[in-house]
Each structure stands twice: as structure tokens, then as C-alpha cells.
Image (cartoon, grey):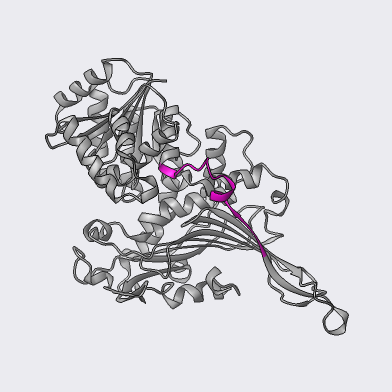
Amino acid sequence: MSFDLVLFGGTGDLTWRKLMPALFQAFRHGKLPPGGRILAVARDERSDAEYRAFIREKFNGVEEAKQPSDDEFARFAELLHYRRMDLSQPAHYAGLKQWTEERNADTVVLFLATSPNLFSTICEQLGAAGLNGPHVRVVLEKPLGHDLVSAQEINRIVGATFREEQALRIDHYLGKPAVQNLMALRFGNALFEPLWRRESIANIQITIAESIGVGTRGDFYDTTGALRDMIQNHALQLLTMIAMEPPSTSEADAIRDEKLKVLRSLKPFTAETVTRDVVRGQYKAGTVDGKRVPGYLEEAKVPAGSACETFVALRTEVQSWRWAGVPFYLRTGKRLAARDAQIVVNFREVPHPIFAGTRQANKLVIKLQPEDGLELHLLAAKGGGPAQDGNEVLSPVSLDLDFDKAFPSERVGAYERLLLDAIAGRLNLFVRSDEQEQAWRWVEPILDAWSRDTIGPRAYVAGSWGPAAASALVARDGCVWAEEQ
């Protein structure tokens, strides 16, 4: 299958930091379809050779195992092309259309790796130039909008140019192997699904923690914040995967229909419940990995006195027969104690303990980063003889599945998987417009309540796990966060 992949924002951070390394890995693994071209477009003037040299230099910053040899890059670079474009000029889109028509590829994928405020302009111009035929797909990178109204406006303009099945809203967390294995775990095995309900599960925790700060992106982050940056998209998508009902088929819309039902079933927030069930924080100076780091307000390009949140923890429920009364805790933050993304499913304790020793409940840990895997925590007898009163003593043990070791030659990164799916037209891991809008609809009461709040975010020390109020949030239900267990 021949394809043309056009990267708008071809010299930007996302392109050289994420997309080009992912495309190279797909090329290295022999998964990139033959007969493809990759075209980067941006405002400055460069030749193909100059752009290839630019990307070659950027590869020096990639982890060593993923760096190309000179021979590998020379072969990969044959796919790379560059074109200068002013995104406001219709003539430049006409030239792009002519470039794609040179060989009439089977598929044209237009990846908008630009600021979201350019999405509307680009899509309108693509439509006017006729670059929206049935063989064309457009990929939209988050954040898609700043609130519900702006998201709806982007979707309106995109929908006026492309059919829904042509518009691929990307959430790279859905491309992570552990998330894909979550579907396999639930719907490909008979073991867990009978237990995947309120009678067996005490609570579910979703954590996306970063040890880094905002770096040089303070001006961008200050207009976004942790709620928009992580909760509205990544964390909610993970929640839907955990809580969805079994779809009737593995087709994209069957899966996305079930995810949408979860979003519509989330308990809505009010001004009162935002105060009670949502914690927002902002990091102050502290120590991370043995190094002193500045607080958020001392970071470059952060406005003085900013009330932007760098941490969010919240409690919600899915109001359905399967999940009624089960707390879902979502947590994300920057400058936390570790880089860690995981889903923890805490099962209920046995109704009547008959063994001595630990009474720790079972739990399933789905690890998303820094490594992918599954841990199942159980209790087992030590086997060292009976304890007092002739009772066996139970101790915690775990079954640990490391996906990198289980599938050493078949691992595909998140962006690599999603780019290959975009080229092939597989939509399962992309977000539909009604999902995206419903997620915005759910977080809007939080944003509204914060806009009227005069207190601001709670301070937490960089290198910690966030404000103490986050621990108090789960303690009200008699729970603790995973690192405290």
C-alpha cells in the first residue's frame, strides 16, 4: 500500500522528538508499508537535504538503543522530503495537492503537529484545496480545544471538511502496549471479567505521575494546567477502558460506543462536590532525584502569582449497575516523587478471614510507564509450618508479567502503533468527537469552580506525592494511594 504522510509543523518539537523516532522504528522493524513518502512542511526555507540533516542531528538525543546507524538513517532518509508552507496561503495548499497527486498514493495522512489554534485554518484550507478526498485522513494532536465550546468549534470545522471516519483524534496513551493488553486481559480471557464489578472491586486508582517540571514550556503550560493536559484526555480514556462494558465486536465504533457510555455515566460535579472531591496543587521548590529544583512560580516563562495547577487528584463514580458505589480515583502531577503511570484495581478483602498473618487484599497493577506490565498481588502460605493455634500464616506474593521480556522482538511504541494505524485506517485507538466533547462536558464544572475560587492551588514540595489533601481525599473512604500500601 503506497502512502504519503504529511507532517504539518515538520520542524516542531513533537515531530522531531516523538513522530520521527516512531517512524524510524516502524521502518527499522519492517512495519512501515513500502512505497511511502514522508513530507514535513513548515514556514522556513529548507531543501530536502537540509531537512534530513536536521533530523539526523535530532536523532542524537534519542535513547541509544533507538538511534539509527549511518546506513539505517541513509535508507530511512530516502523517504523524507520537505516543503515550505505558509499555512494561511491557499496557493501553498494547491502546491501540496499537486505534490500528492504526482503518484496518487493509496492513502494520504495529514498529521497536524501544530498548535491547536491552527487546526481550524488548516482544515478550512485543506477543504478549499480539495485535499479531503475519501483516501485522505487527518490526524489531530491534543489538546483539542481549551473548553467544551472551543472543542465543539474545532469539531464543527473539521466535520465540515472531513467525515468522522477521516478525522483521527490521537491520544498516545491508547497506543501503549499495556493499554492494548487491558482490552485483551478483560475481553480475551475468562479469568477477570466475572470479578470486574462492584461486588468484587473496592476501588480503582489511575495515576499519571511525572518527576519533571514544566521546563521551558511555562507559558504554554500556564494556559493549560494538569486538568486539561492530563485528566480530560489521558486519564479519562484510561478510565473508559477500565470501566466499559464488553463491546459486541472489536470494530472501532463498537468499542467507542461503550467508552462513550462510561463518560456519560460519570457522576457529574457541582460547585459543592468540586470543593469536596477535587484537590488541585502547585509544586514549590524541593528535591527530585537528589537535585534541588525550583518551584513552579520560579520556572521560566511562568507569570508571577500564577494559580495554574500542576497537580490534580479527584474522586468520581461510574453510575451504572456494574460500578455503583465504587470510587474511581484519578491523579496526575508534575515534580512528583517518580515518573510512574499505572492503574491499580484494588479488590475487596475476603468476607471472613480464617488465616493468621497479613490481611492485605488482592490487587491488580497495570503498569504503563516507565515499563509496561502486569502485577497480580495475592496472599500465599509461607510453607514454613503452622503458626499459633495451628493456623497457616499468609504473606503477600506477586505474579509479575514484564511485556518487554514476554515479547522481546515484538514491542511497538505508542506513537509507532498509532502512526501505523493511521496509515492503515484502523480507528480503534483514536478518539471520536462525541467522546472528546463528553470528556470536556464532564470537566467543565471543575474549571468553572476554579475560576471563581480565590484560594488557589495547594502547595506541595517537589519530589513528594502531592498535597496532603490528596491522601485525605482517599482516606475518607478508608483507602490509601498505591505507594502507601
Q: Check the image and name the residue furthest to the left.
A: 45
Q: Quadrant of the N terminus?
A: top left
Position of 197 compared to 136: left or right?
Answer: right
**Magenta span of residues:** 398-415
Question: Based on the displayed image, in which of its 4 quarters is residue 302 positioned?
Answer: bottom left
The magenta stretch spans residue 364: no
Q: Which is nearer the eye, 154 or 107?
A: 107
Question: Based on the displayed image, in which of its 4 quarters is residue 343 positioned?
Answer: bottom right
Position of 8 compared to 344: left or right?
Answer: left
Q: Which is nearer the eye, 254 or 156?
A: 254
Residue 133 position (above or below residue 241): above
- Tally of numbered tags: 0
Question: In the image, what residue occupies the spot 40% across and 48% down?
Answer: 65
Residue 382 position (above or below residue 248): below
Rendered location of residue 373, percent (x, y)? 56, 54
The magenta stretch spans residue 408: yes
Rendered location of residue 349, percent (x, y)? 72, 68
